[in-house]
Image: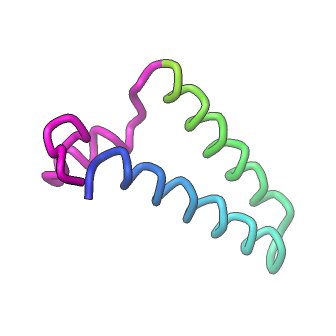
């Protein structure tokens, strides 16, 4: 798995989790969905988000360094 795939996976999982939490507990969890969306939006322009740094520290490689995936 690459950093880019992990970021997409984590972003999608966080959106689904926050929607479930909003449905079962409190509508305020939708603000977490907004945060995730804004973070993904800014990362599209800057090519950086905190999760990318964490995944690189965990040993995941960038897409360019592993052309077979």
Question: What are the residue bounds of the magenta stretch?
Answer: 46-69
Q: Is residue 28 left or right of residue 10?
A: right
Q: How many marks?
A: 0
Residue that lies at the very extreme toward the top in this rendered image:
46
Which residue occupies 72% across, 44% down?
34
Q: Quadrant of residue 67?
A: top left
Residue furthest to the bottom in view is 24
Give the side of residue 13 with respect to residue 61, left or right. right
Residue 33 in the image: above or below residue 45: below
Q: Is residue 6 toward the left or the right of residue 15 in the image?
A: left
Percent from the top left, x then y, of residue 39?
57, 36
User: Residue 21: within the magenta?
Assistant: no
Residue projecting furthest to the front: 68
Q: Quarter of the image containing the N terminus?
A: bottom left
Indicate the quadrant where residue 47 lies.
top left
Eyeballing the image, is 26 above or below 1?
below
Which of these two is toward me, 12 or 68? 68
Tell me which corner region of the image, top left, top right, bottom left or bottom right, holds residue 58: bottom left
Q: Residue at x 66, y 67 (%)?
A: 16
Is residue 66 or residue 30 the one in the foreground?
66
Left or right: 47 as drawn, with respect to 66 = right
Residue 8: x %, y % from top left: 47, 51
x, y percentage for residue 42?
Answer: 56, 26
Q: Please identify the quadrant where the C terminus is shown.
A: bottom left
Q: Is residue 6 above or below residue 3?
A: below
Looking at the image, residue 12 lies above or below residue 65:
below
How far across and down, in percent of the image, does residue 20 sit? 73, 74
Identity of the residue drawn at 42% across and 49% down: 7
């Amino acid at each position: 798995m690459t950093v880019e795939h992990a970021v997409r996976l984590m972003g999608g999982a966080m959106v689904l989790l926050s929607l479930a939490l909003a449905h079962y507990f409190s509508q305020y969890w939708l603000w977490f969905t907004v945060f995730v969306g804004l973070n993904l939006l800014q990362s599209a322009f800057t090519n950086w988000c905190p999760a990318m740094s964490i995944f690189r520290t965990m040993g995941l490689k960038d897409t360019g360094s592993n052309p077979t995936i």
